[in-house]
Image (cartoon, grey):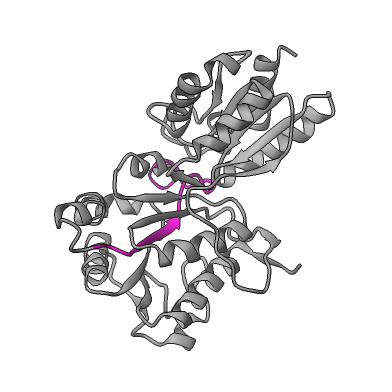
Amino acid sequence: MREIQFREALREAMSEEMRRDENVFLMGQEVAEYNGAYKVSQGMLAEFGPKRVKDTPISELGVSGIGIGASMNGLRPIVEYMTFNFSLVAIDQIINGAAKMMSMSGGQYSCPIVFRGPTGNAGQLSSQHSQNFENWYANTPGLKVIVPSNPYDAKGLLKAAIRDDDPVIFMESELMYGDKGPVPEGEYLLPIGVADVKREGTDVTIVSFGKIIKVAYQAAEELAKEGISCEIIDLRTVRPIDYAAIIASVKKTNRLVIVEEAWPLASISSEISYHVQRFAFDYLDAPIVRVASKDLPLPYAPTLIQEILPSVRRTIDAVKTVTYK
């Protein structure tokens, strides 16, 4: 199977859906003439023209509102944010508009819209450009939230998101756009809300999602050298969460570690921890342990960044805590 970059997988997903459905269009800052801030939309203006690949002003609130209005009138917009840190300017439109429109209109209006762009740490970008908001959006009824970790999942899930009749938050990472992975030539879609067991194991379940799952992979490789077998579950979507997959794995391994890039308070890992202790308590042989970012704004200094973010060492220590190794 061919290997392509994460950005290429996203581009293929959008382009295929735009060829399939003339109501799909892309809008955002620098998506057209500049070929995208991260070159995700490279070449799309040339193929689809300025009516369907639209550069917008630096006004996330206005752009999101236009997208929501368009989606209510039969179109399927893809709104790109240069970073989800900037989506906070538009959060009123997303949460009080898109997420609630179906309910408030009594089912008369749906909002088939995708809000996509990078989330989380991207190196030395400091506090205002390095935050994770997937748990914020996942807290909102009416939204679906997808955080893929590899090119294959990204393409299949983005195509599913574009076809979905509900508003979807699709979160990527600047540090993943150049990642390569196998992606088949033919069309495929992945179901929203279904987790994937990326690595089979017997001693402990590690649940993660997005780019930080790479930390789980590295930790699992190191732990395997010491005879500790880790099962890794990639959530892929954090609303809805595939609780059944997590519970099934915990019933097999009897231990759970959750690795997440967001801050610890009211996080996805908090929700999973509650659900597992509620519905699989009798299967746990050790307390649930989570590895999250320290409860601080991300600094600029690279040494401090390493201390704050989840690391391979912290993940290994967490696994050894629950396996008593």
Task: Name above or below for residue 63 compared with residue 231.
Answer: below
Residue 178 percent location from the top left of the image: 63, 61
Residue 81 appears anywhere in the view? no
Tell me the quarter of the picture where residue 168 sits: bottom left
On whether residue 127 falls in the magenta region, the answer is yes
Q: Quadrant of the C terminus?
A: top right
Q: Quadrant of the N terminus?
A: bottom right
On whether residue 276 falls in the magenta region, the answer is no
Which residue is rendered at x = 59% and y = 57% of the image?
Answer: 153
Q: Nearer the viewer, residue 96 or 57?
A: 96
Task: Name above or below for residue 147 compared with residue 229.
Answer: below
Residue 97 percent location from the top left of the image: 20, 55
Residue 173 percent location from the top left of the image: 52, 53
Q: Nearer the viewer, residue 197 or 68?
A: 197
Give left or right: position of 76 versus 8: left
Which residue is rendered at x = 50% and y = 35% of the image?
Answer: 243
Give left or right: position of 112 versus 19: left
Question: Main structural element of the magenta stretch: helix, strand or loop?
Answer: loop
Task: Name above or below for residue 251 compared with residue 241.
Answer: above
Q: Nearer the viewer, residue 173 or 200?
A: 200
Task: Name above or below for residue 32 compared with residue 193.
Answer: below
Q: Which residues are magenta?
A: 110-130
Q: Nearer the viewer, residue 85 or 239?
A: 239
Tell me the quarter of the picture where residue 12 sits: bottom right
Give left or right: position of 133 versus 189: left
